[in-house]
Image (cartoon, rainbow, N blue to C red):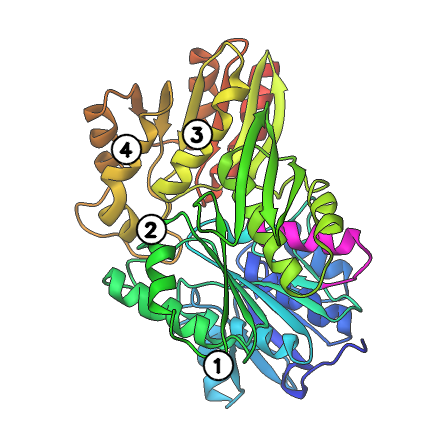
Amino acid sequence: MTPVIPPALERPHFIGIGGAGMSGVAKILARRGARVAGSDTRDSESTAALRALGARVHIGHAVDHIAPDASCVVVSSAIREDNLELVEATRRAIPVVHRSEALAALTEGRRTIAVAGTHGKTTTTSMLAVSLTGLGLSPSYAIGGDIDAPGSNAESGTGELFVAEADESDRSFHRYTPEVAIVLNVELDHHANYASMEEIYASFETFADRVVPGGTLVINADEEGARALTARLADREGLRIVTYGEAPEADVRVTALVREGLTSRVTVSLGGRELTFRVSVPGRHYAHNAVAALAAGVAVGVPARELAAALGTYTGVRRRLQLQGVAGGVTIIDSYAHHPTEMVADLEAVRGGAEEGRVLVVFQPHLFSRTSELGAEMGRALALADACVVLDIYPAREDPIPGITSELIIDAARAHGADVRAEHTKDAVPDVIAGITGPGDLVLTMGAGDVTELGPKILARLSG
């Protein structure tokens, strides 16, 4: 298909261009021939990848970074209203476009698969992107993380399919009109934007209502929130609902799931026949993500057996249980988990990879609001580790909340018998880990902030 650039996006300026979601949209536009520019607070692998595509990237925010002929300014929900460039765009009457609006415009004319859910969006979107690409279908895709290298979170393909990670955190997934929507799970999160589960359900219902008439919703049959959403959508006309999971009533039913080290072998019953395939990443939740991807691909007409084989070639996405290396007999793995459900899933997934050693965690809480609401559950999750180090809260876009600190998590972890210590200085962590690990141990650096930077430093310390 001939790539199209919407007129408003021909000369875009991105505020926060290096962000996971923003950089993906910017890369697709650059590959389609748009004159892309933007700014960010620091250089990164993403900004380097964008420069390689011809984008003009400024470090720091300043009003003169916006070109005189900019067609629009693209922002995400993380950009504050008092950002210098956003204020300047308003003063100059330059159209301000939310990232999700830009992505929705890029999906026009394509058969879109939108992947939503409280957890697992990036992995499932990546699984589809890798497998569909491997089958020669040349999909376009936009993912909230890099698949295997800097810059690999987005592609402007020539095929008719577009796979997009659909973010519920700010309700931006309401802007898409997918042919197939996936809902992996429905839990309360993003407490700054949602006050209750009722608000969450209503938001996911709106997302489901955006599926094109005659389209398909692929939804988890095992998870409580997804089941409740399915019941709420049961009377929707023109919406085909396909459930997946281990539940006996699932349309795509997992009949066997055998763990083999850090991989799994999955058997599903699909369309009256059984199909077995390998999932090359660890954990039951990743196997279920692969089944969701399989159901979605089949819904757009991809042969099930071919897609299952292609899914087996997926080896992971950066920061999702990504192996950082081994030094001194200690394995370092990076985990993006920041919600208690994700933390439990990743800890259970790696437990078998620790051989005879222990599982230790370096955890960095993400957001004050999330810690306020879920800190006790985070502490309970950390009790699954043999020992853990808890850092200060990574604020991201939030201001501090009085009385909300990592101590909430630490106290809860200790109440559940965890061996946990606080560490307020990230630079001290490599020495701390070196002092408490031994051959055969496995260390998870865990969280959605900059804790990921500690993996290489820990490896260097253990190698010294």
Extreme bottom residue here?
93
Kindly report which numbered mark, 3 or 1, lies closer to the viewer in this rendering.
Answer: 3
Kindly report which numbered mark, 4 or 2, lies closer to the viewer in this rendering.
Answer: 2
Instruction: Tell me the residue that label 2 is attached to.
Output: 224
Local SS, label 3: helix
Residue type highlighted by circle 1 = Glu
Q: Nearer the N terminus, badge 4 or badge 1?
A: 1
- Kindly indicate whether the residue at mark 1 contacts the one at mark 2 (C-beta within 8 angstroms): no
Magenta span:
123-139
- Kindly indicate whether the residue at mark 1 contacts the one at mark 4 (C-beta within 8 angstroms): no
**Can you say whether 353 is above or below 245 in the image?**
above
- Left or right: 126 with respect to 393? right
Seen from the viewer's position, the closer of residues 202 and 238 is 238
Instruction: Tell me the residue that label 1 is attached to.
Output: 88
Residue 130 magenta-highlighted = yes
Taking the spot 47% from the left edge, 43% from the top edge, the residue there is: 246
Label 4 and label 1: CA atoms lie apart by 43 Å
Label 2 and label 1: CA atoms lie apart by 46 Å
Q: Residues within 10 Å of mark 4 (few under 14, many from 20)?
A: many
Label 3 and label 4: CA atoms lie apart by 13 Å
